[in-house]
């Protein structure tokens, strides 16, 4: 295959924006159950919700009564003009002024109620979002690590950001529109019937026509909306992947191929977006056309009834306003239905996440357990440990070892042998499926996970730093450390000199992806962080893999000083870094195949000797 045909692999992507987590028309699996649970969750906000409902009803009622009151002013004005033309009287401006003031008062009350209702619902929706985000964040802390190994980071982020946002927006707008639209339909219909039942029947006759026409448009446009959102996700995915792999694209000369792929998807997006937007744009003219037909029918029938004295001119004017106000809430109720479906779908995803099983806890008081953990010796025993990420495929078969307090233990072996898995079990990221791991004679499953992890300091091959200053990243190991202590550990990790070359020194801000410093410098900072943590045991997973040989020697000295008196576990592929270890465990296929010191294992001439000699074969040659 030519390089021109190489392009980034496509991953499922939902796009970006306020509705990126769900496609148009996405529905919950169990609408009733989710809605019931959502109502139960909203029970904590029943007082502001009830007040918002009352204000919404008041706003709608005052708005509905307004045209009827205003119609009396129109009738009074018309009667006064007729009387003036006939010479039998004139226009009573005092009466008209009083009516107009009353109408203004009604509309002012409607606006005030609407403002209060909007203020209350916005507060409720944002408090709901705040509470759900907090529950999700706390849930993440209680969930087992395996859950995140099985789920993409994007899906978790989508639930805590997009789904909660969709839920809040739909709750704020949907509930309000549902109340106001329902009250408006009932109220307007009652006012129209009070004016003239026959005219009401004529006006209602227009609704089936508009419903059929709009239904036809929605049926055709829906598939284009879904296709548009899918293609938007592909476009966003292409852009994200191309930029994240920009150097690879450049290195393999695949710019043209990426451009062509983007143009193809972008053209399809343009086509589907045009169709969906055009069809949606037709709905307003259709509704307007049907509405105008209704106005004509009302005007003709109203004139007929006015001539016969059945209705007044003001009643006709009010009726026309009611006809206009009647069709709008019906359209809004259709939108509310989709909005409630979206809200339920988002709520369902959030509740599914909150219902996920949590990591096993212990019954002991955490503070008491922490004191108990501090009193333990740092002897570590692996007693016939068995574990597999898939229970049918064990990674660790039957692992047993005893490490004395203060020993430096190296775990070596080929890739996939189970070295990092042992560390995950030791930190209780996972629990063993058989056997036990004991620290100071206590099964670590009898201690809270937080207490177990507080015993260890870690330096991983994948150096993780957060967006913040260098000082804050180092201090992450001990939040109470002083600036002098931060500088001291930075010197011990041989990173102080580099820091002082930066414009802002320790106050230099590291970018979100730590792209403004090298991989080796990142690793030095994580080593400084581990030194500052000053934990009783250490785990070093390829801690010097990204530094040069000279710096590695310096760091090795610092780490040797740090490991004095501490039980330390070192995972290393460069075997030259662990020759001074007190005990080397050679692991293959999840079991210990050899153990001893460096010299003992070399003299044995077995698996370790083969690994060691293979790394220095080139130097020997």
Image (tube, helix red, strand yellow):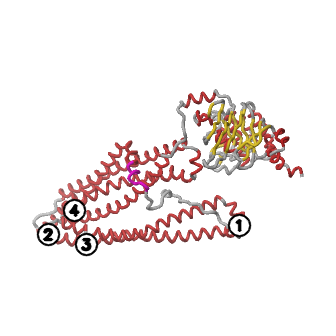
Disc 1 target residue: 253
Q: Position of residue 34 (x, y in %)?
A: 41, 51
First-in-chain label (4 vs 1): 4
Discs 3/2, front: 3
Residue 503 in sight in this render: no
How far apart are labels 2 and 1 at the CA level? 88 Å
Disc 3 target residue: 296
First-in-chain label (2 vs 1): 2
How far apart are labels 3 and 4 at the CA level? 16 Å
Query: In the image, what residue occupies the spot 16% across and 62% down?
Result: 91
Q: Position of residue 112 (x, y in %)?
A: 32, 50
Query: In the image, what residue occupies the spot 40% across and 45% down?
Result: 41
How far apart are labels 4 and 1 at the CA level? 71 Å
Query: In the image, what residue occupies the spot 11% across and 69% down?
Result: 86
User: Does residue 320 appear to the left or right of 561 in the view shown?
Assistant: left
Disc 4 target residue: 192
Q: Secondary structure at mark 3?
A: helix
Instruction: Tell me which corner region of the image, top left, top right, bottom left or bottom right, holds residue 278.
Output: bottom left
């Amino acid at each position: 295959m030519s390089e021109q045909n190489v392009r980034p692999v496509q991953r499922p992507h939902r796009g970006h924006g306020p509705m990126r987590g769900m496609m148009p028309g996405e529905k919950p699996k169990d609408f009733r159950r989710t809605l019931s649970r959502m109502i139960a969750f909203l029970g904590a906000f029943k007082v502001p919700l009830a007040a918002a409902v009352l204000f919404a009803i008041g706003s709608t009622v005052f708005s509905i009564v307004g045209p009827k009151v205003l119609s009396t002013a129109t009738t009074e004005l018309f009667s006064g003009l007729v009387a003036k033309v006939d010479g039998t009287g004139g226009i009573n401006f005092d009466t008209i002024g009083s009516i107009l003031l009353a109408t203004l008062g009604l509309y002012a009350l409607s606006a005030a109620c609407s403002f209060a209702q909007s203020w209350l619902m916005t507060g409720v929706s944002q408090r709901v979002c705040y509470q759900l985000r907090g529950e999700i964040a706390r849930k993440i802390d209680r969930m087992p690590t395996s859950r995140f190994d099985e789920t993409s980071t994007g899906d978790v982020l989508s639930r805590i950001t997009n789904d909660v946002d969709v839920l809040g927006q739909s709750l704020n707008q949907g509930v309000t529109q549902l109340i106001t639209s329902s009250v408006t339909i009932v109220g307007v219909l009652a006012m129209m019937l009070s004016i003239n039942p026959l005219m009401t029947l004529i006006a209602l006759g227009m609704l089936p026509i508009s419903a059929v026409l709009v239904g036809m448009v929605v049926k055709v446009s829906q598939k284009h909306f879904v296709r548009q959102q899918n293609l938007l996700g592909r476009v966003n995915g292409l852009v994200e992947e191309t930029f994240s792999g920009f150097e690879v694209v450049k290195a393999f000369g695949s710019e043209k191929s990426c451009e062509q792929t983007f143009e193809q998807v972008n053209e399809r997006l343009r086509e589907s977006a045009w169709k969906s937007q055009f069809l949606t744009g037709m709905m307003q003219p259709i509704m307007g056309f049907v509405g105008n037909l209704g106005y004509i029918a009302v005007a003709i029938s109203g004139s007929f009834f006015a001539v016969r004295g059945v209705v007044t001119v003001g009643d006709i004017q009010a009726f026309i306003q009611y006809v206009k106000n009647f069709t709008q809430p019906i359209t809004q109720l259709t939108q509310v239905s989709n909005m409630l479906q979206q809200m339920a779908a988002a709520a369902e995803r959030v509740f599914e996440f909150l219902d996920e099983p949590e990591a096993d806890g212990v019954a002991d008081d955490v503070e008491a357990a922490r004191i108990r953990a501090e009193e333990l010796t740092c002897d570590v025993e692996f007693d016939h440990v068995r574990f597999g990420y898939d229970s049918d495929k064990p990674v660790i078969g039957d692992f047993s070892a005893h490490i004395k307090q203060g020993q430096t233990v190296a775990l070596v072996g080929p890739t996939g042998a189970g070295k990092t898995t042992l560390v995950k079990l030791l930190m209780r990221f996972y629990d063993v499926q058989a056997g036990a791991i004991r620290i100071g004679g206590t099964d670590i499953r009898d201690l809270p996970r937080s207490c177990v992890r507080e015993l260890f300091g870690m330096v991983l091959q994948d150096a993780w730093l957060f967006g913040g200053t260098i000082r804050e990243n180092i201090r992450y190991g001990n939040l109470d450390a002083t600036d002098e202590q931060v500088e001291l550990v930075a010197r011990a990790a041989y990173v102080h000199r580099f820091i002082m070359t930066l414009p802002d020194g320790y106050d230099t801000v590291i970018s979100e992806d730590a792209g403004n410093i090298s991989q080796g410098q990142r690793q030095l900072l994580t080593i400084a962080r581990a030194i500052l943590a000053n934990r009783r045991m250490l785990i070093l997973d390829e801690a010097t893999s990204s530094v040069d040989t000279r710096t590695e020697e310096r760091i090795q000295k610092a780490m040797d000083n740090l490991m004095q008196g501490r039980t330390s576990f070192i995972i290393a592929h460069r075997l030259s870094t662990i020759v001074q270890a007190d005990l080397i465990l050679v692991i293959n296929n999840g079991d210990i195949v050899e153990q001893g010191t460096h010299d003992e294992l070399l003299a044995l001439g077995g698996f370790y000797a083969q690994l060691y000699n293979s790394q220095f074969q080139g130097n020997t040659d």
